[in-house]
Image (spheres, rainbow, N blue to C red):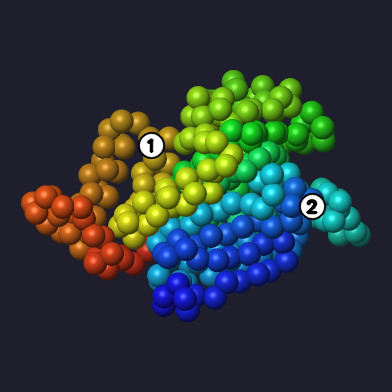
Amino acid sequence: MTEATRPSIRLEHIHLEHDGDVAIITLDNPGRRNALSRPMQEGLVALIAEVRRSPGVRAVLLTAAGNAFCAGADLVSNGIPPGDEHLTRGQSTRKVMMEMSNPIISQLRDLPVPIVCALPGVCAGAGIGIALAADVVIAARSASFYLPFMHRLGIVPDLGTSWFMEKLAGRARATALTLLGDRLPAEKAEQWGVIWSCVDDAVLRESALAVAHRLARLPAHAALETRRCYEAASHSGLDAQMQYEADRQAELIDLPAFDEGVRAFLEKREPDFSRAAAPTTNTNQGDTA
């Protein structure tokens, strides 16, 4: 299917378009600073599924309209799920998180194609989990991260935010940001290793799209295998990780992508991995977020 025949999909508060082999998912409710409404969450699940079943898509760019990426959960339109005779308010909230919100992160991390996230402005609350689920995060200089959970609401982070922040920023920094509620500017986030890079606001989209197109040239299995490798490393000893690497290399060396890479090396050219058929995805291999 060519770009011309791939339809754009517009849902409430979110839409999907294509730039060549890159799928662009845009959170689109700038009047509410792209707060996570229920329609936006449902739409994100639907668009992730659409990307997964689109064979011509080789990378994803996740971004947002306006000057904010996501203000977190939309407490105005969503409200807090009320309790009933069977569930407390907290239990109702947990049910929504487990059935709709948390699967967004799991499905992003399980996409076989690489994901670039472009942050045009503030990324707060649950939006942090969505942003950091990407493989490469690029932020505008005006962007910042804000964790309002504890100091404004008296709750802990959600949508994997504590998992990502502890691994990327470190426990001391993640804890202080959560308790104090201080904003983390994009430039400092880059210095701390929370994001890949920080660019001028005016060139954010073109910079992120260029990175997405670079990633689209990788083997079809590159993103998923790389995620799994580093997730395994985060809880493995050295010997166990070397065993994991050896096992995965043994399987990947038998794939057409490796043959193309070797041919390209010998012929002194860049590899064209689009010639190599994608392997069957085993979603149970390794750990995912």
Mark 1 lies on a secondary structure that is helix
Q: Nearer the viewer, residue 219 or 141?
A: 141
Residue 104: x percent and y percent? 60, 56
- Which amino acid type is shown beneath numbered disc 2? Gly
* Drawn side of residue 177 relative to residue 274, left or right: right
Q: Is residue 115 above or below residue 136?
A: below
Tell me, for residue 150, which label it has, or none.
none
Q: Residue at x 38, y 37 (%)?
A: 233
Numbered circles on residues, count? 2
Is 133 displayed left or right of 282 in the figure?
right
- Counting from the top left corner in percent of width and height, residue 58 is at 40, 62
The image shows residue 230, relative to residue 3, as above or below, that is above
Residue 96, visible in the rendered structure:
no
Report the residue at 40% width, 70% height from top: 56
**Residue pushed farthest front?**
202
Residue position marked by numbered label 1 in the rendering: 233
Front position in the image: 153 or 193: 193
* Residue for point 36% across, 44% down: 229
Q: Point out residue 5 in the picture as x, y percentages from the top left corner.
A: 47, 79
Residue depicted at x 74% and y 22%: 180
- In the picture as drawn, the residue positioned furthest to the right comes out as 85
Q: Residues within 10 Å of mark 1 (few under 14, many from 20)?
A: some
Residue 176 visible (yes or no): yes
Q: Amino acid at mark 1?
A: Ala
Q: Give the residue number, with chain letter if any, for mark 2.
A: 31
Cα–Cα gap, marks 1 and 2? 41 Å
